[in-house]
Amino acid sequence: MTESIWSGAPVQGSAVPAPRDVRNRLVAGVAITEMAAIALATYIAFVAYHQIVWAGPPNTLPYGWISIGLALVYGAICLADKQYDFLGAEWNSGAVHRSALALCLAFVILLAVMFLSGTVTSYSRGTFVAQLALALPAAIGARVLCWRVVETSRRRGYWSSAGAVVLVFPSVGKPAEVLERWSSRLEDIRRVYYLNAETGDAQLNEIVRDCRRFQTDTVLLLFDGDEMSAVATAVEKLSHAPVNVQLLPSRIVAFLHSSRIGWFGRAPVIELKSGPRWVADRFLKRSFDLVVAGTAIVLLMPLLLLIALLIKLDSSGPVFFRQVRHGYNNEPIEVLKFRSMVQRNDEPPFRQASRNDPRVTRVGRFLRRTNMDELPQLINVIRGEMSLVGPRPHAISHNQMYDGQIARLSRRHNVKPGITGWAQVNGLRGETDTLDKMQMRIEYDLYYIDNWSLAFDMKIVVKTLFSKKSYQNAY
């Protein structure tokens, strides 16, 4: 059966998409526009710098070639990174920042080539800084302008993609909901075929003929884990047509966000990871932790000493509160906090703080409301037991309380716990006295793990300092 997913009605007739050369001309136009903007910006920066500093440019021909070469390298990087695929995530989700990264990489490649060729000494450092400072906004501005032109022309029907065909296998439940959740453009899905086990071969032959007839360039197979034999048959049939075959296992689609193609011996495999598990990601996150935590300890040392003095003057007991909690891979770690409560001998070893809790001291109430009781955990970060950003570590008895009630609770420990986290800056800190509260916190923590990036960490740190939500439920 063939259906349109947005209407639910059988498809009547066929709409042939705009010729592919229309999109090819758009790709060429966008690439040339961006490269021209970069070449022009870098050359203007060179001329302006020498006019201002040296009251006149020297021989301009070498810098002219440098500007052209830089633009060509930038264009090659964007093409290799699929940034001109108008239907891909690189264009629609991260167009601006990927353009900036491509330009920075182009400058690095340029400097490397000049170093190897022995000509780097002729490249003025002032010119380099001026070119980078002017080329970055030029590249970003060109990308924003081109993106708007491309999207406007698409909405007005000046061009369209060859589109995708979706093959839905029998055991997939609610395929329309799956496609609506994960597809950024439902209008680019031309056909949805619901495969039938009884007429599989005949239906696949029909689909191959339709792909040739309508010049479809992508076929998406939406399947479940029990249908690998049928999927293999479909892939073999579809290989007879010049189409890209994409596999989307519906049950684990949420985990594919952080996946990559790896190798088991000589066999390619799909590697599913969560959090900063790749070597480069771990290096970036650890470097960020060490730099920020080390700098914070040095700059905040007078404040830390003042807080310690106030705690000693306010109530008897140690300055630090130490508690064993679960860290990475469920390993126990001793988490440090400024003591904000008085501990009574007749109380159980663990009880979460509640609103108007009589155990909270006067100084402790201020520390908890301002999150400053967490500052000693910068030491945990330096020691490598915690990270600046991650799921907040729960007491072991707290985890045991909900163990078995929340299926994905232990996934929080696939990364190091953090001083702050995505749940906390969304107002989900404080007491979790109900199952619903804990489940909501877990969902935010898992979202962070599955969508980790260094930029995401920086965003959470900024929100921790300046967002009102990060101070909610602090008592």
Image (cartoon, grey):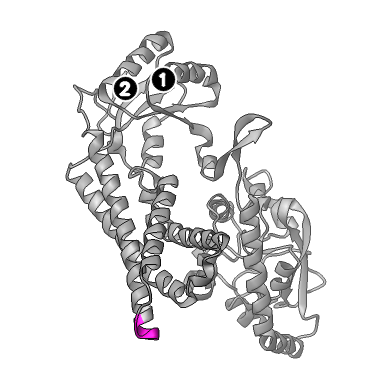
Measured along the vertical axis of the image, is residue 92 above or below residue 41?
above
Task: Report the residue marked by disc 2.
Answer: 211
Name the kind of residue labelled 2 in the image.
Answer: Cys
> Residue 74 versus residue 284: which sits nearer the camera?
74
Please report the bounds of the magenta region as a residue range: 51-56
Q: For the residues marked 1 and 2, what is the alpha-carbon distance in whole angstroms?
A: 9 Å
Give the percent coordinates (x, y) of residue 343: 77, 74
> Residue 5 versus residue 60: which sits nearer the camera?
60
Name the kind of residue labelled 1 in the image.
Answer: Leu
Task: Report the residue marked by disc 1.
Answer: 238
Judge left or right: residue 354 versus residue 188: right
Judge left or right: residue 167 versus residue 469: left
Give the percent coordinates (x, y) of residue 280: 62, 54
Residue 470 in view: no
* Disc 1 to disc 2: CB gap under 8 Å: yes
Judge left or right: residue 265 versus residue 183: right
> Residue 23 versus residue 116: which sits nearer the camera?
116
Residue 192 in view: yes
In the structure shown, which secondary structural element does the residue marked by tag 1 occupy? helix
